[in-house]
Image: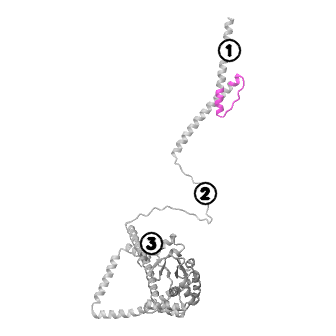
Amino acid sequence: MGRMGSVRKRKSRRLERKSKVATVKRCRKKVDVSMENGDHFNLEQGNSKCKENAVKACKKQKTQKRKVSISSDDTADSNVSEDEWEEVDFVDQTNYEANPDGTIEVTVEVSKPVETEESKWMKFIRQQVNRKIRERQINCHKMHLLCYIAHLRTWARALTRHEALTSLCLSLIPEGYITAAKHEFDVAIAERFMKWFRSMFQVTKRKYISRDGFCDSQIKRLEDLIGERAYEDDKDLASLLFLCLLSLKQCTRLCLSCQPIKQKVTVSMLHSEHTETFAEKNINNDDNSIVWEEKLYEVTKKVQMNTDDCSEKSSIKKYEETKKPYVKKSKRIEKSNSEHVASTNKNKMDSRRNYWVEYWDHNNARWICMDPWCGTVDMPESLEANATVPMHYVVCIDNNMGMRDVTARYASKFLSAETRRLRVDASWWTDTLKVS
């Protein structure tokens, strides 16, 4: 019986030890879980402390589970509430700066107006009218260029055909330049010749007016200028230099910087007031037809009343009497306008030069420009500086009536888009110069 009791005691002790070991393991596991959640425990030896710590860990774990369940419910509710609300892009309000002058700018989006049938027709008519205006402006530009070509050709032909002019110029040139030109007429000789030419011909204030015809009267005027050794404008000076070089048996060119009217239509031309008012009257006035019918009736009534011969004679006399003072007044107005235009053109010509001369250098095989207005030789940049702005058409004609466009030689902005927009279609321009 004693042995059996001892065996039982040993077994009970072993069971107690095993239970203690199991509880310790459980405590360690629970302590690890609590350590992960942020709670740190210090294990001490002894069964009582392990039990107390295990109980505390279990209580904390239960409270944490409750908190987690509550927080999960809250997150679910928050997710539901977030689903109910729309997402809004918040603008950073710190970037806004107040205006220094204290003004406030407000942008309001206005709905587009609805196009009616009348507005569509007005837009279509305006587009067609603007297209016709552009075509007319381009045609006027081309016609002005043709007038420049005709003027230059007619003037060069008149200078070359009248040998009296070249003989008069040759009589003024010293013998040294005549003999030098027979052998070699290089840039150095051309510069000395230019100095003599500018000292020979001086500007005059006297008006040499040409009368009765174009060519003959202009030739007579040039003869008077050569006799007086004077000139009025840049055209006279370039023509005299052209004649002097012809008398020296040099191949020469007469150059002209053309200034035609613009081919691009301005905004004021497209949106003129009379076209807009005419369109508005035709659209807005509903009684136009009635007004026109009344006017037509009045006109026909007047015509019927003037069928008698006496009334016709009296009306003719009255018309002639009223016409005479009007004609006189119109002539006075035209005369004053022409004088005003002539004075403005003279002022413009005093400051700008659009005519000059070129001659062919046989040694260097190139054309050399001579500017009688400034007295320079082989300096094309000075020509552009003193010519009328913009320089976009430079046409020259030689003594054999050969015409060519030499704008690229003198215009520094010839390849720019600005100059290209001012010029007409290249194919039309080249074909025109070939035909002329």
Residue 101 at x, y percent in the picture: 62, 66
- Quickly name the residue at label 3: 426
Depicted 200 relative to depicted 370: above or below: below
Does the residue at mark 1 contact the one at mark 2 (Cβ under 8 Å)? no
For the point 65% across and 22% down, the residue is: 23
The Cα–Cα distance between marks 1 and 2, rounded to whole angstroms, is 79 Å
Residue 120 at x, y percent in the picture: 39, 67
- Residues drawn in magenta: 28-50
Q: In this view, which residue lies farthest toward the front?
A: 183
Magenta residue check for 48 = yes
Instruction: Rate crowding at label 1 as few (under 14), some (14 to 19) or many (20 or more) other CA atoms within 10 Å.
Output: few
State the quadrant of the N terminus: top right
**Of callouts 2 and 3, the N-terminal one:** 2
Depicted 272 relative to depicted 238: above or below: above
- Quickly name the residue at label 1: 13
The Cα–Cα distance between marks 2 and 3, rounded to whole angstroms, is 54 Å
| 28 sits left or right of 261 in the view | right
- Of tags 2 and 3, the one toward the viewer is 3
- Seen from the viewer's position, the closer of residues 401 and 32 is 401
The Cα–Cα distance between marks 3 and 1, rounded to whole angstroms, is 120 Å
**Of callouts 1 and 2, the N-terminal one:** 1
For the point 68% across and 32% down, the residue is: 40
For the point 29% across and 89% down, the residue is: 305
The disc at residue 95 is 2
Magenta residue check for 175 = no
Instruction: Rate crowding at label 2 as few (under 14), some (14 to 19) or many (20 or more) other CA atoms within 10 Å.
Output: few
Asked whether residue 220 appears in the rendered view, the answer is: yes
Depicted 425 relative to depicted 9: above or below: below
